Image: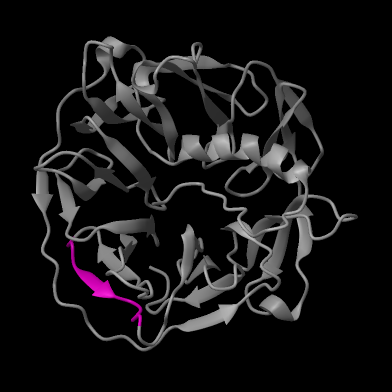
């Protein structure tokens, strides 16, 4: 699924320095993967369950073969991401003993024709890449890249920047030795320089999932230890109004559309509700997707799904789901565009035109140009 997974098997990636830096970065990835929101106190956590409505899956339509292009060589790369303008693919590397460990960039058009260029240190970047957060001496440092201004935040875990790069949030777990489903999590929000920090939610067995545009935040968790099920909640930090999206024992894979209007998630180990769901962030009834696999948002209202492969060595295929209507169409065909993706390591470009993925055949980065353009 859409998780921050790194795979070093067969890599010489390339020194202990990267491993140390990535440990902190992966913790931040784990915080961003879901998108639930909590309220100011546990007793205020909403418990209503959204109405779940299955959506029809029309028969697939034929599409011309999309374009595949190799971007890197040498089996170099893991954890690809995108520049805000969708013109560069970024990845973590240390290409030689003398080269610095960090983020490297390759042009999405020229690809392997030119060598990747060093782009910055390993850390958590804001959406517009104007800010970076990284660990230093048991603290978190936030740096504004254009000016070099730095702020040191103590007792702060991996942070998540707001979409407008004005604030950050993090989850504090005072007792991280307890079983996860019983662990208390306090969610804090502050300005990017650490001022005006305030606790905005407390949940159990969950925490911060991420930000939505417009000063909203998503949390997941149990309101108290007396409650068995978790609630996925959207909280408006300005009005303190909260919206309960769904309540279930196991909610994972939370992902918001580009504009925060839609949220996708999956429910497991529930006989009547197991599967992938799409729901508006305002709490409108949810829609079930009649396929199972990995997914990411292409734009404000289209979800890309890579279904599980049939048994054997079949290639992956990409489908597109319209969130409002539930209509689906197949974008790639395994026979003409064979996608071999390693460990679910793929990312959609901000403009929705491309997918970059790590190939399970050669462990290089490949670019897939999607039909249909951006939404």
For this view, does 79 lie left or right of residue 312? Answer: right
| Part of the protein shown in magenta | 325-334
Name the image quarter holding residue 330. bottom left
Report the magenta stretch's main SS: loop
257 sits left or right of 287 in the view: right
189 displayed left or right of 213: right
Rendered view: 271 above or below 222: below
Identify the residue at horizontal 71%, vertical 39% (top origin).
21
Q: Quadrant of residue 110?
A: bottom right
Q: Residue at x 52, y 37 (%)?
A: 162
Image position, residue 347 (x, y; %): 49, 60
Residue 195 x, y percent position in the rendering? 63, 18
Q: Is residue 103 above or below residue 70?
A: above
Towards the viewer: 362 or 301: 362
Residue 38 seen from this side: yes
Does the image show residue 145? no
Residue 327 colored in magenta in the image? yes
Image coordinates for residue 111, horizontal then vertical, percent? 67, 76
Of the 4 image quadrants, the one containing the C terminus is: bottom left
Q: Position of residue 224 (x, y in %)?
A: 28, 12
Q: Relative to 243, is 55 on the left or the right? A: left
């Amino acid at each position: 699924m859409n998780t921050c997974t790194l795979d070093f098997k067969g890599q010489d990636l390339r020194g202990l320095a990267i491993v140390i830096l990535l440990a902190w970065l992966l913790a931040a990835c784990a915080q961003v993967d879901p998108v639930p929101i909590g309220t100011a106190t546990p007793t205020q956590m909403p418990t209503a369950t959204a109405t779940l409505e299955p959506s029809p899956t029309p028969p697939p339509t034929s599409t011309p073969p999309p374009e595949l292009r190799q971007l890197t060589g040498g089996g170099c790369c893991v954890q690809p991401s995108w520049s805000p303008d969708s013109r560069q693919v970024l990845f973590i590397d240390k290409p030689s003993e003398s080269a610095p460990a960090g983020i490297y960039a390759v042009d999405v058009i020229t690809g392997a024709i030119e060598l990747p260029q060093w782009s910055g240190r390993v850390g958590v970047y804001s959406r517009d890449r104007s800010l970076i957060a990284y660990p230093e001496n048991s603290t978190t440092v936030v740096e504004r890249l254009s000016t070099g201004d730095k702020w040191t935040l103590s007792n702060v875990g991996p942070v998540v920047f707001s979409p407008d790069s004005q604030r950050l949030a993090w989850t504090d777990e005072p007792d991280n030795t307890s079983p996860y489903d019983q662990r208390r999590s306090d969610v804090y929000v502050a300005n990017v320089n650490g001022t005006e920090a305030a606790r905005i939610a407390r949940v159990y067995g969950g925490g911060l999932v991420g930000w939505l545009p417009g000063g909203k935040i998503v949390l997941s968790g149990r309101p108290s230890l007396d409650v068995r099920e978790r609630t996925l909640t959207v909280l408006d930090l300005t009005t303190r109004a909260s919206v309960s999206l769904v309540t279930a024992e196991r909610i994972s894979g939370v992902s918001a559309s580009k504009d925060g209007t839609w949220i996708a998630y999956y429910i497991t180990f529930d006989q009547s509700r197991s599967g992938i769901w799409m729901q508006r962030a305002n709490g409108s009834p949810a829609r079930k997707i009649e396929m199972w696999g990995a997914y990411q948002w292409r734009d404000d209202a289209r979800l890309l799904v890579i279904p599980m492969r049939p048994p054997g060595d079949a290639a992956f295929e990409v489908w597109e789901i319209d969130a409002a209507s539930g209509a689906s169409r197949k974008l790639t065909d395994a026979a003409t565009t064979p996608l071999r993706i390693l460990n679910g390591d793929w990312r959609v470009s901000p403009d929705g035109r491309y997918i970059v993925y790590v190939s399970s055949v050669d462990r290089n980065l490949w670019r897939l140009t999607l039909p249909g353009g951006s939404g």
